Image (spheres, grey):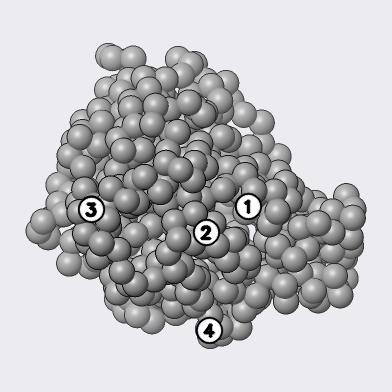
Amino acid sequence: MAGVAASILAGSLVLAACSSDSPEDAATDGGASAGASTAVVTVNGNEPQNPLIPTNTNEVGGGKILDLIFAGLVYYDAEGAVHNEVAESIETEDSQTYTIKLKDGWEFSDGTPVTSKSFVDAWNQGALLSNAHLSSYFFEPIEGYSDTEDSELTGLAVVDDLTFTVKLKQPEADFPLRLGYSAFFPLPQAAFDNGDAFGENPIGNGPYKLSAEGAWEHNIGIELVPNESYEGDRAAQNGGVNIKFYDTQDAAYNDLLSGQLDVIDAIPDSAFGTFEDELGDRAVNQPAAVFQSFTMHKDLAHFAGEEGKLRRQAISHAINRQEITDAIFQGTRTPASDFTSPVIDGWSDSVPGSEVLEYDPERAKELWAEADAIAPWDGTFTLAYNSDGGHQAWVDATVNSIRNTLGIDAEGKPYALFADLRTDVTNRVMTGAFRTGWQADYPALGNFLGPIYGTGAGSNDGDYSNPEFDKLLAEAAASTSIDEANGLYQKAQEILFQDLPAIPLWYSNVTGGYAETVDNVQFGWNSVPLMYEVTKSE
């Protein structure tokens, strides 16, 4: 809407209506006062990979905690609709320069005010190359961002304590949709005074805060209590949230059944056939924006160049996804037909090239033989996974499918903890394939593509790079409508199906449940339970 100031998020934006010139406001039942119940609720979790710095956390264990102790400019409700949180308004005339006004009165849990500088300084810290933060990629659209040298985000400017502007390198109409992701959270001055100490005892502005210094007991759990200074719609309706870290999903589920856990967001595969009967109407099995795959680094022996492309295609054709999802997941997974998620607006199950995902043993053998003609295969194909996440059964089934089809040695490679697996992936020391997946940060197709496969992106674990793919991402981001952008994202996926930087496996339902001890349990569009809504009687 050139020449007219368009209020992007003055109220809220329903994502299903993103292409509309005048999106309707979505209803929200937020704003209830804290303390609807006073008992502390418990939920399963994982030990975070890193200290809890928002821009250096890109995995689910840490992300679950950050979303409870921080508040961003916007937040996403259970349906994926966007609502203002700290932002009073986000306005633009050209989709390139945005003026962001903050609500007055917000404070961090240490009593310091949330100001424009809190956002600008946090974003600059996360974007700085030498800091090597995992989510730096999310600041790439902002003027001044560099992935080759240290550079300030010159596109950020503080106007006053409650106003700042963001100038992008090009118009990007969906930029405001991203601002509820943790990379865009604000930080208090304490985070810059002593980053190491802050990461262990983070100070946020969200509905919860750490119960005390040292409330994060590594490999055990973290205790959160309501943040009395929180000003937003996600006010805690309970007396706190204890996130308990489990070595296995079976242990978490057994605790749920025995009354030692209130909410679980991942049912172990051993209970897929029984959990809905055991939990009744307290069982949860619903679509979510979660995609599963595995990845081989682009420089891994036998998986580089033309030989690697042939082997990736062969392995993809060697996996019987339908049989595995039926036998192992029993209706809680759907074989993938692209690199995104069916719950996201614009998804398609007919992207050209997606036939590489079809189980075709004969074609798999032909492709493997073509690769052997370039360089004969030797050794064992390994697929690394974290055993604390309930992955052994599908990994065993997948490597069996590969072994039986291609006639090669193939086996799973277990890691005891998710954090340990992610550390080796981040440090680029993996010697075989490794489990990967994506839980959406914000509800858009591009979020499943750019952060994972864009050149230099923080979650690009295989270091994939294709200039044509990057060009299509940039064109999609600069689109004037979501429909136009989605068309370009589908063209970008055609390139992914040729290169296969990751092997798509299946889409995940969120399978979870809750005990008789709690009420008002709702799981969001991205599979995460809205813990601030949960109530529990004493």
The residue singled out by tag 4 in the image is: 218
> On the rendered structure, is 341 left or right of 515?
left
| Identity of the residue drawn at 28% across and 14% down | 2
Amino acid bearing label 3: Ala
Q: Residues within 10 Å of mark 1 (few under 14, many from 20)?
A: many
The residue singled out by tag 1 in the image is: 324
CA gap between label 3 and label 4 equals: 49 Å
CA gap between label 3 and label 2 equals: 21 Å
Q: Please state the horizontal and vertical placement of residue 275, each as a whole percent of the image.
A: 82, 59
| Identity of the residue drawn at 72% across and 76% down | 251
Callout 1: SS: helix
The image quarter in which residue 38 lies: bottom right
> On the rendered structure, is 296 left or right of 470?
right
The image quarter in which residue 117 lies: bottom left
> Which callout, 2 or 1, points at the residue further toward the start of the chain?
1
Q: Please state the horizontal and vertical placement of residue 194, each as a whole percent of the image.
A: 32, 79
Q: Residues within 10 Å of mark 2 (few under 14, many from 20)?
A: some
The residue singled out by tag 2 in the image is: 404
The residue singled out by tag 3 in the image is: 373
| Identity of the residue drawn at 42% across and 20% down | 483
